[in-house]
Each structure stands twice: as C-alpha cells, then as structure tokens.
Amino acid sequence: MPAETLCKTIHQYSKLPIPKEEMDKLLEIAVDYCKVKNCVYSRYGGIGSLKKLYPGYTVQNEMTKSGLRTELGLPAVYFYLAVFEALGEIKSQWSRTKAKVLELAGKNENFTQEEKHYIRFLLRVPNAFEAVLNQRQPKLPKEIQKQYESLTEAVETDRLNRYLCRQVRKYHKKPQTDAVQGFSISERAYRYGENGKQYGIYISTKEARKRVFVALTDRNSYRSQLYIKLKPQEARIEIAVPLTVAVRNHEDYVNYVGVSMGFYTMLTSDKGHSYGEQLGAWQTEYAQWIRGQQASYRRNRAANPGRKKYEAQKRRYSEQLHSYINHELNRFFQEEKPQVIYMVKLPWGQSGGVNRKINSSVSLWPRGYIRERMKLKCKEQAVELIEVLGKDISRECSSCGAIGQKENGWFACKNCGYQVEEKTNTARNVLNRGQSGRTIN
C-alpha cells in the first residue's frame, strides 16, 4: 500500500540583484500572462460558458484559435498555463457562489423542505444548474432525470428557478486581475545549473532560445511546476515550489491533548506544559516598533516617503517570529506525542476595546499563522486536529463544570475548591469538550 502524502510549498530566493534589462524580460512575460488570464475571465467567467469549464479542453482549443498567443508573442508553455490557471480561478469563484446561494436558501424561512431540496439538487448537479441559469430544460442521465422529475412534482419550479437566477446574478462576479505579480512555469521552460561560480535557474523568455539566469541562495533543484513571484522594486524574485512529502506515522504518538492558545503564552497543554512563553514579549516589542514607525512616517512623510528600511526590518521581525513559532510547535509535538489534538475555535472580527495600544498588539497577534502551521504539522505527523466550541471555556471549572473566578492568571472554583492556572484550566476544558463530542465540524 503506497504511503500517504501531502503537498507543501517551499520557497527559493534570488541571491543577487537582478539587472533591470533581465527583470524587464520577466515582467514582460508576467504582463502578457495577466492579459491571457483576463481574456479567459471575460470570455468564460459567465453562465454561458459553464458547460465548457469541465474538463477545460474546449476552452483550450478556442483560446488557441483566437490568435491571442500569436498576437502577444507569448511562448505556448506560458500561454496554456495562464489559461488553465484562470480556469481554476473561475471554477473556484463558481464554488463560492454556489456555497453562498446554498447558505441563503437554507436560511430562507419562506421555503419548504421540498423547495430547499430542489434548490440543493440544482446546485449539486452541474448539468441541471447550467440549464436553469441559461433558461433551458435540463437533460440529465436517466437515473438523475427520474430524481429531478420527482422533485419538480412537489414544487413550483418557475419560482425557484427565478430565485436561483436572481441570487446568482447578485453574488457571482467574474474574476478580474490587474496585479502583475508573477507567472507559473513548467519544467520545459526552466532548468537549474551553473553560471560561472554561481548556481541558479535559467528561465525562458519571449525571445527564442534566450534564457535569463538568476542566481539562487541554495543549490536545490526541482522538477515540477513552479511559480515565479517578481519583486521588481527590490530587483529580486521568489520561487514557490510545490513539494510532495510523505506523512510520518509515529507509533508512540498515543495521547489525547487539549491545548489553549494565548497571546502571552502561545500554547498550553492540559497537563500544564507551556510552549512559546516568549511570544507575548516578542509580539509586544514588535507592536511597539510598528506604532513608532507609523508615527515617524506620518511626521516625515513629505520629506522622506521611502519605506525600504521599514519593509526590510518588518520582514526580519516576521521571520524571527515565525521561526520561533515553528520551533515551539515542533517541541510541542515531540514532548506531548499527540494522537488527537483538541483546540478551541477562536472567533474572528471581534470588536476592540478603548485602549489603542492593546488593540494594536492584538491585531498583530499571529494566531492565524499559528493555526495554519498547527494544521500543516498535524497532517505531516498523521495527527488528528479537532476544533471544539469555545463559549465560556475559560470561565468553567474543568473539574466540576461550575462557573469560577479568574484573577492574576489563576482560576478558582468556589463550588469544589479547585485552583489551577487559568490557561491550564482552559486547556483541560478543551480536552473535556472534545472528548464529550462538543466539537465543530
């Protein structure tokens, strides 16, 4: 049986400043790449092209006949990557539109269960969805056609079809991009190699048999589709590399662990072990520096509009913080040896208080990055991650379930006399709720 794998993205960076002439050649590809994507968006982003999106070869053939590639002089290796990348984004936009309509229909109290069932059927059967939006009678495979006909007998289809069309017109937007950030590149359009004493990557340009050499900071080479992200103002590039890695199974990872995520201490386990205790200090220092830089920039904007040093220092702060977070997460897995991790789902979009300094610090709290890294590392280590309900989770006693009091970082329950650190009490409540089934799907 083949080992389970997952895909992760790593990055490579250019080592030396790229000359302007060579950066212009790469920017020329990125501009044309953007034009091709916008052309696909405008032609195939609407309801009339729904039946052409899967598997996409009809779009490919029509774009070939359009003459756009010849007009731009763009190599085929870039042209077709742009076409299929745009198709993928159109499909994603349709998925978001369907999800929104499905949510609204489910909440609509004016619909009966049969009417909601009919709308869900249309949203989940591509041929029926496309036919209704284009005012045609659906023609479906025999078994699905029988199900469709049985649904239409119990509802007023004209009213529901109009509702579906109306919601799609309201919420579906054709993708559009004006950002010239970079382009995808397949193996045929690049190669790794030496150029004198430098090791780097040769990238094909619009000029036949001419490649741009970019020296890299490492000597790794890959054979997959890459994404070249251009940084013309900094005269450098970043290369995003999708890498397939094997999932590691650990026989000694057998524990069920509840964790509490905090601002000052990154993670606390239900056993009271803390990980990332310096996060709060680093985060406070970073927030103070940001506020100071913003105030200085507002005072001196007219005389000194540049932000190069600011961006460089901000990037160093972020890299140090991310390195610390990853180190502590690795330590968490090595010491806790979890089979299942229970973690509270934190709400987003909370209103701030009256203290601007506190609001600023909390807004910079990298909880999103911590959660994403936790999810990725769980996948890499074959650990199950379960989110639990978080209401009153820090106020409940993890011993008896009564509402207790919090003071100076400690939790005390008058009902049973239980006393423990607040963050440990929260982590134990997370574990209790996870094992009792109070989780979030």
Image (spheres, rainbow, N blue to C red):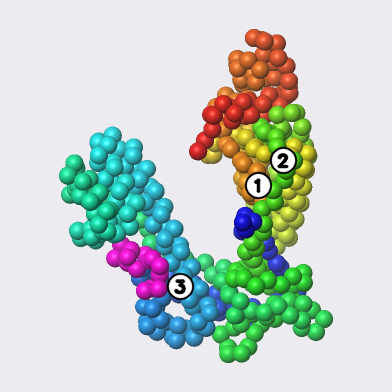
Q: Identify the residue under disc 2.
A: 253
Q: Which residues are magenta?
A: 45-59
Instruction: Give yes or no for contact between labels 3 and 2 (Cβ–Cβ under 8 Å).
Output: no
Name the residue: 59% across, 28% down.
435
Q: First in sequence: mark 2 or mark 1?
A: 2
Q: First in sequence: mark 3 or mark 2?
A: 3
Is residue 285 a member of the stretch shown in magenta? no
SS at circle 2: loop
- Where on the picture, by quarter, is residue 274? top right
Q: Position of residue 424 (x, y in %)?
A: 71, 27
Q: Identify the residue under disc 1.
A: 382
- Say if 149 sits above or below 281 in the image: below
Q: Position of residue 11 (x, y in %)?
A: 68, 64
Count the marks. 3
Q: Residues within 10 Å of mark 3 (few under 14, many from 20)?
A: many
- Say if 355 sits above or below 70 in the image: above
Q: Identify the residue under disc 3.
A: 83
Q: First in sequence: mark 3 or mark 1?
A: 3
318 left or right of 163 in image: right
